[in-house]
Amino acid sequence: MDAAPYVRAMLEFSIIIPAAWICYCPMHDSLKYSPRKTFLLCALAALIYFPLIGLFQMTFSHIIHINVPLGISVVLFFLLYHRTLRTNLSQSAAMFLNACALMSFPSSFAYAFDAWLHPTSNYLDFSFSATLFQLALSFAIAAAATPFLWKHFAYAIRTIHSTAVWNTFLIFPVLFTASNVFTIPLSYQTLHTGRMFQIYVGMETLFLLMLFFIYAILYRISYVLAEQHRQEEHTHFLQLQLKQYQSLQEYMDRTRQIRHDFRHSIHALSQMAHAGDMDGITRYLHEYEQSIPPSSPLKYCNLSGVNALLNYYRDIAAEEQIQANWNIHIPALQRIPEPVLCGLLGNILENAVSGCSTVPPHMRYFNLTIDMKNSHDLYIVSSNSFNGVVVKHNGEYLSTKHSGKGIGLSSIAAAAKEYGGTLVVSHTDTAFYMDVVIQIQ
């Protein structure tokens, strides 16, 4: 048997390799397994797939166009792709379909190249030269898109958690892919009519630029959402600091007034003691105790923003009848900005208080330990009561308040990773645990 047609058939489907790279490139932070294990799974699938698809195409290529088995392959590979990721279905589908859209352009340009080489041929007689041209162009586009996908598209995956945004974004790759499939020239002579060849190539180039422009818009959306979230956090922390300042000022004013009135109280008590009025002394001391202001805001550390945040949630815990057992020791920061630490702690505190609210008051507790374990790592260990209800997908905790990934946990994980740390989350039927390690010096 002549091996040339078999090799050519497998080459026609080799565009799956750059397509796979485009799919996984922005997902390097969202892999379910290690990169090595993911690569081995994909390699095993390729070793099974390519010989079979090559044999099929060599046997039926004269009656079945390549897009038919390729379409079936797309469905099977998407199932494998989504199973290897920790993203939701909308994010996986958006990235997968965009890879399909990008790879449909080398195919269109290859048909134009084939028509230029063989004007009297048609799309069923796709030449070997055109196959090599398509494969080379596919790798070139994948290489050119890699920096954007690795940095900016990955940023969008981490930042945009709304399934509505990703579902809307699905429309564009579907439209571009469908356009490229339905504009395949059935007869190459069509492209040699008038200026059809120039128009076809020009339109494909324009569509490709439009697709990259849509990618830029998506990144801009993710950047605006992230910036808005940072501004909201900053405003929230400023409000907490203002509240702490007001509490301190009120405490100082009331204490000053008590000190001023103290000598009058001593004189009144002396008179009642001289008269033997023990009931009056008891009543006066009770009223005096009631007039003493509540405990002042505690100083957990020398960081004003972090201190305000901890006092704010301590007051909420008291109002919600949550037994708060906190052991806080935070040294001066050198590597991590205080707003970043505030954001991380704020999400931990908010999640814990929210979890406690799901159980009766007598079952509510929140244990928090923050301490240095060596010269540069800050350990944050949190445990709180909750009702045991969690939503998980592919081993990842999802929000119980809305569809999709929990923004708080994602933010904690992102901050920990950015500063060389880790986040470990676990739960039992009655308790939720978070262990965070982060480098602060």
Image (cartoon, helix red, strand yellow):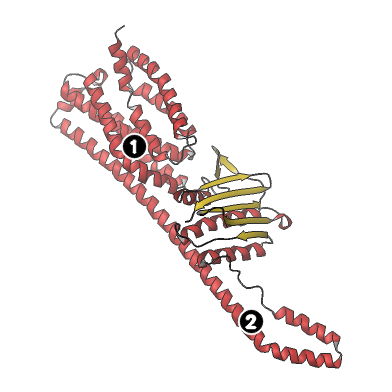
Q: What amino acid is at disc 1?
A: Leu
Q: In the image, is residue 175 above or below residue 5?
A: below
Closest to the observer: 258 or 119? 258
Going by the image, does 287 lie left or right of 333?
A: right
Judge depth for marks 2 and 1 and give the one in front.
2
Going by the image, does 409 lie left or right of 113?
A: right
Question: Is the N terminus in the top left, top right, bottom left or bottom right quadrant?
Answer: top left
Q: What amino acid is at disc 2?
A: Thr
Closest to the observer: 371 or 386? 371
In this orientation, does residue 185 appear? no
Going by the image, does 307 lie left or right of 46?
A: right
Q: In the image, is residue 186 above or below residue 101?
A: above
Residue designated by label 1: 175
Q: In which quarter of the image is residue 266?
A: bottom right
Percent from the top left, x then y, of residue 269?
78, 89
Closest to the observer: 252 or 187? 252
Tell me which numbered mark, 2 or 1, is placed earlier along the sequence. Answer: 1
Dot 2, how many residues are within 10 Å of its Cα: few (below 14), some (14-19), or many (20+)? some
At horizontal 64% and vertical 52% (from top left) the residue drawn is 383
At horizontal 44% and vertical 50% (from top left) the residue drawn is 418
Q: Which residue lies furthest to the front in this view?
A: 375
Going by the image, does 380 lie left or right of 365?
A: left
In this orientation, does residue 255 appear? yes
Q: In which quarter of the image is residue 169?
A: top left
Residue designated by label 2: 255
- Quick one: SS at disc 1? helix
Percent from the top left, x then y, of residue 83?
49, 32
Percent from the top left, x then y, of residue 108?
25, 30
Percent from the top left, x then y, of residue 38?
45, 31
Instruction: Tally the marks.
Output: 2
Closest to the observer: 248 or 19? 248
Q: Residue furthest top?
A: 1
